[in-house]
Image (cartoon, coloured by chain):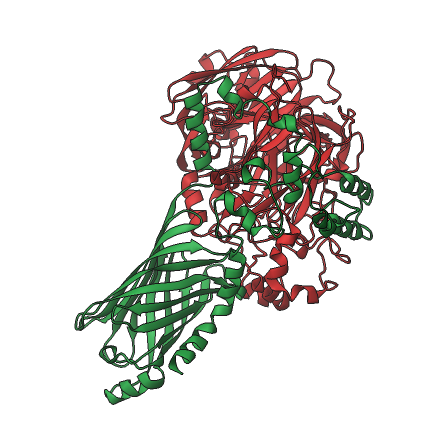
């Protein structure tokens, strides 16, 4: 029952992620050799990737055949042809028809339809065999081969292979309510390429008058699994002055959900065998170009009672905040806001039993900056 | 005054007087190349001014410089110490040897944009040659077999964004079919005090960093941009209707012949003269809307190729495109020449005037355009009318949300990976569309379908095949690619057989305009002007639309093919075109 509850809870934010992962079936792959697996027509016999220098441009199987044989239809599975329309070997036929419809009423250059007609009749075959003749790299015949190889490698790296990085202090804030004032930080940093990054997260809190409550650091491999989402996995290390430190395995997704919500959902398995999970969502509502209102929600849950942390199984806590920040420049913005923090379920009872108030409202003030 | 003792001619002295009247403006202009002087150039090429380079032997020196704009000085990479670089003025039929010396501590190169030449002279490191090492000289040598307006720029790193660009004019061997009395060369560009690598890194960190014209709640309340329903629909698809330009006036100062808007570069005319303006967009990242309020323009040449004259009031010029227009100002007054960035975040401004020191009103920046369903590749849907009104849209079809916006079946054969955030569901031929944001301006706007080449197309053969190339990207990750592949991923080159005639269809699966450039060849835009299709080296592909071009792969060798938005190229929107067999090889 408990587990079911947690799974259900996790499932709430997860449909988005699940959808992303579906897309990612096409995307998990950088190596070109895997492309065949993702081909929607993967049912058929295709020549090896090496034989197909145009897989990216042409209509998949059609062009593959064209390259291995001068006859574009030789040893081609006719059932595949039918899939595309036997009489019209243009796999775009459907779209072109759309174009034709589109240009009817409003298009001032309806004459182009004839161009479209021509195009429909043009085969989308690969290049003729002579296009593969001669040296692979023309400049090698004129300039030093090693120098050309080095400059090719530099060119390749520079067009899309860059390593970038970010350090973002998302919240560095003072929280003031009943009781002692507290400080909170939350920061993200990453370094890496477009699809794979090393991602560091840290957050923690403490009292100004007292000590640090807790601090955590996560080191994650972050892998793009869709246009808007990364899968993240790695380790999390918690430091608490009054308790033994805890290490966790962390698995989660982070990204941009439909309607532009920034979402970060992760599950953690501790070295004590405890399972916990956390879901965060925030949204930037731009009031003016520089004034931004940010609702932010964080929901925590636990798979079991963890007495030393004062939490019970089930949902443990919910923070719901509203922060108003002013971006002097996009990379530097002070903010003020209010946050409602409440313990949930069994945790709520534990908090009460300890003589503390399970509901708190705090005013916050802080800065967000990145570089 | 000491200066008067030096031998300067009368017109120069007059200019100096004029400069005093306008507060030292000329002092700035005097550092500009002579071809950018307010006097313009005589009809014949200048022969002796230092900054106009002519003849068969030309020396160019690449070095670091400082560049002053406003009150700030930045770091520039220049050619012969000027920004823009010297005008190279050649004549069709001559040979030229260009000795390029690299005084930088990094490699450099020069690509002769639009010139037809042997591939090893094309100047792309890693494709045509190994590049020019620090403190070495490379001699380019090739015959000039064409005429028109072109330009040159670095193809190394991001030097092009730091001032390493200049104009080329090739005068025709015979009579010029364009009639004019005076000409001015107008080089449009964008300047930032941020290092271009820093700009690139910032875009990777925060792709909308430079967009300071986003949709806001305040705007909603005052009726700007989209209504609530539309905003929700776009947000549901995670698409940004205000994303018009990646790098904007937030960091750019837009330059005309190296002058910021306040420095007001001025080109002179005598009322009644036919003035030819050779307009080159040498920007790194800026597409411009060009107009001269009160002065109609006659477009006579596009990308160096003559076209049948088209009268217009405004045109959108993609990065690396060139347009020659003839204007005939009849009144004795000043006219503002305005190059407004596509997202309306800033403008380049110059003045055409009968005398120095004159000014005309500079039009205010217009409202930032808002993307429409047509820019999303819904353009092919019946009932759509240029994106003005979407009430006729079948909203039911949008219920699929991003699924229908990223359906791999709509782009068979391409790798729909995390670097691809959209597949245009029904892209339209947009060669007849006005440029983004110009749909409703109340005057004439040039479209590609209006361009008709003066000369018949040289190769009347029907293409033997069609090649579809998808322009792809992910705005959120700032990834850009061709067919879903960044060049860094080791992509297969695009291969053509020598003299093969091919139709290429460029499908834009992104919501940005991409100026796509093919090196070493001219292609003919399939725009309905059969037999007189305009021949270009660079073509703007509008968001969610497609352009088809026919071309003859008549230049053997390896050639770059890429988006000319520099950061897009640098992010991977690049590939190599290979034309085989080479000379002297058996087929």
For this rendering, which residue is in front, B536 or A193?
A: A193
Task: Determine the residue positioned at 64% across, 48% down.
Answer: B412
Task: Determine the residue positioned at 46% across, 12% down.
Answer: B6
Position of A286 relative to B180 (above/below):
below
Corner quadrant of residue A90: top right
Specify whether residue A167 is in view: no
In the image: residue A133, left or right of residue B127: right
For this rendering, which residue is in front, B23 or A299?
A: A299
Residue B33 on image: x %, y %? 52, 22
Residue sticking out furthest to the front: A75
Residue B111 on image: x %, y %? 53, 25
**Figure label count:** 0
Position of A281 relative to B314 (above/below):
below
Specify whether residue A97 is in view: yes
Image quarter of the C terminus of chain B: top right
For this rendering, which residue is in front, A144 or A171?
A: A144
> Chain B colour?
red
Position of B196 relative to A292 (above/below):
above
In the image: residue A103, left or right of residue A315: right
Residue A366 on image: x %, y %? 33, 65
> Chain A colour?
green
For this rendering, which residue is in front, A328 or A358?
A: A358
In the image: residue B335, left or right of residue B242: right
Corner quadrant of residue B526: top right
Image quarter of the N terminus of chain B: top left
Task: Determine the residue positioned at 50% across, 40% down.
Answer: B572
Residue B331 on image: x %, y %? 72, 32
């Amino acid at each position: 029952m408990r587990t079911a509850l947690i799974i259900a809870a996790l499932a709430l934010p997860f449909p988005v992620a699940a959808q992303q992962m579906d897309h990612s079936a096409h995307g998990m792959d950088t190596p070109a050799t895997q492309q065949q697996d993702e081909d929607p027509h993967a049912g058929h016999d295709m020549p090896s990737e090496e034989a197909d220098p145009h897989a990216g441009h042409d209509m998949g199987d059609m062009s593959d055949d064209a390259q291995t044989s001068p006859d574009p239809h030789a040893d081609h599975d006719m059932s595949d042809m039918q899939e595309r329309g036997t009489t019209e070997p243009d796999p775009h036929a459907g779209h072109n028809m759309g174009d034709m419809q589109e240009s009817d009423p409003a298009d001032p250059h309806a004459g182009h339809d004839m161009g479209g007609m021509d195009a429909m009749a043009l085969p989308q075959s690969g290049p003729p065999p002579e296009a593969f003749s001669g040296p692979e790299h023309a400049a090698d015949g004129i300039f030093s081969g090693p120098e050309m190889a080095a400059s090719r490698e530099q060119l390749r790296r520079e067009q899309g292979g860059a390593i970038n990085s970010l350090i973002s202090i998302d919240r560095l804030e003072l929280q003031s309510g009943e009781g002692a004032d507290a400080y909170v930080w939350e920061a993200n940093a990453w370094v890496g390429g477009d699809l794979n990054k090393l991602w560091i997260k840290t957050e923690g809190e403490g009292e100004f008058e007292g000590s640090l409550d807790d601090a955590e650091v996560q080191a994650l491999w972050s892998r793009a699994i869709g246009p808007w989402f990364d899968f993240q996995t790695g380790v999390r290390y918690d430091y608490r002055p009054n308790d033994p430190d805890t290490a966790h395995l962390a698995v989660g997704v982070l990204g941009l959900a439909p309607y532009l919500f920034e979402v970060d959902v992760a599950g953690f398995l501790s070295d004590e065998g405890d399972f916990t999970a956390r879901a965060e969502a925030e949204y930037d509502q731009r009031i003016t170009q520089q004034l931004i209102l940010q609702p932010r929600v964080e929901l925590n849950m636990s798979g079991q009672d963890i007495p030393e942390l004062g939490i019970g199984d089930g949902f443990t806590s919910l923070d719901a905040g509203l922060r108003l920040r002013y971006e002097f420049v996009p990379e530097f913005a002070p903010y003020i806001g209010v946050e409602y923090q409440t313990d949930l379920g069994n945790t709520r009872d534990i908090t009460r039993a300890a003589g503390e108030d399970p509901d708190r409202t705090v005013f916050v003030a802080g800065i967000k900056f990145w570089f | 005054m000491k200066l008067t003792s030096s031998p300067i001619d009368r017109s120069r002295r007059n200019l100096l007087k004029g400069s005093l009247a306008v507060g030292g403006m000329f002092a700035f202009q005097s550092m500009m190349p002579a071809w950018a002087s307010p006097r313009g150039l005589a009809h014949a090429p200048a022969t002796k001014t230092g900054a106009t380079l002519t003849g068969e032997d030309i020396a160019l020196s690449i070095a670091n410089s400082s560049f002053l704009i406003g009150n700030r000085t930045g770091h520039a990479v220049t050619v012969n110490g000027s920004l823009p670089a010297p005008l190279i003025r050649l004549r069709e039929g001559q040979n030229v040897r260009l000795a390029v010396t690299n005084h930088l501590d990094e490699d450099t190169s020069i690509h002769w944009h639009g010139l037809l030449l042997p591939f090893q002279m094309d100047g792309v490191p890693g494709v045509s040659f190994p590049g020019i090492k620090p403190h070495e000289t490379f001699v380019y040598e090739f015959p000039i077999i064409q005429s028109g307006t072109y330009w040159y720029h670095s193809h190394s790193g991001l030097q092009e964004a730091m001032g390493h660009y200049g104009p080329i004019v090739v005068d025709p061997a015979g009579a010029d079919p364009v009639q004019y009395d005076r000409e001015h060369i107008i080089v449009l560009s964008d300047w930032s005090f941020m290092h271009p690598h820093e700009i690139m890194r910032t875009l990777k960190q925060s792709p909308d960093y430079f967009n300071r014209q986003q949709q806001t709640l305040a705007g909603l309340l005052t009726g700007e941009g989209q209504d609530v329903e539309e905003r929700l629909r776009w947000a549901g698809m995670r698409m940004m209707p205000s994303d018009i330009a990646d790098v904007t006036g937030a960091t750019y100062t837009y330059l005309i012949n190296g002058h910021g808007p306040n420095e007001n570069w001025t080109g002179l005319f005598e009322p009644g003269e036919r003035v030819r303006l050779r307009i080159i967009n040498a920007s790194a990242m800026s597409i411009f809307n060009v107009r001269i309020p009160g002065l109609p323009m006659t477009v006579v040449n596009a990308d160096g190729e003559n076209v049948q004259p088209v009268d217009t009031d405004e045109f959108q010029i993609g990065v690396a495109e060139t347009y020659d227009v003839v204007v005939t100002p009849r009144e004795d007054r000043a006219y503002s020449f305005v190059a407004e960035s596509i997202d309306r975040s800033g403008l380049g401004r110059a003045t055409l005037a009968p005398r120095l020191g004159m000014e005309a009103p500079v039009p205010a920046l217009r409202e930032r355009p808002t993307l429409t369903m047509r820019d999303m590749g819904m353009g092919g849907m019946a009932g759509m009318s240029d994106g003005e009104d979407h009430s006729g849209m079948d909203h039911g079809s949008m219920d699929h949300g991003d699924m229908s916006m990223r359906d791999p079946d709509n782009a068979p054969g391409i790798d729909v990976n995390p670097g691809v955030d959209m597949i245009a569901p029904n892209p339209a031929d947009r060669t007849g569309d006005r440029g983004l944001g110009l749909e409703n301006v109340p005057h004439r706007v040039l479209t590609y379908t209006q361009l008709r080449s003066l000369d018949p197309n040289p190769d009347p053969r029907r293409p033997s095949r069609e090649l579809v190339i998808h322009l792809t990207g992910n705005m959120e990750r700032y990834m850009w690619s061709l067919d879903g592949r960044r060049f860094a991923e080791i992509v297969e080159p695009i291969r053509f057989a020598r003299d093969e005639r091919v139709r290429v269809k460029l499908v834009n699966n992104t919501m940005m305009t991409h100026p796509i450039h093919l090196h070493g060849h001219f292609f003919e835009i399939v725009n309905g002007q059969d037999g007189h299709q305009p021949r270009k080296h660079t073509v703007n592909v509008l968001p969610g639309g497609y352009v088809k071009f026919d071309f003859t792969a008549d230049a053997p060798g390896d050639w770059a093919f890429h988006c000319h938005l520099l950061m897009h190229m640098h992010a991977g929107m690049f590939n190599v075109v290979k034309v085989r067999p080479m000379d002297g090889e058996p087929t």
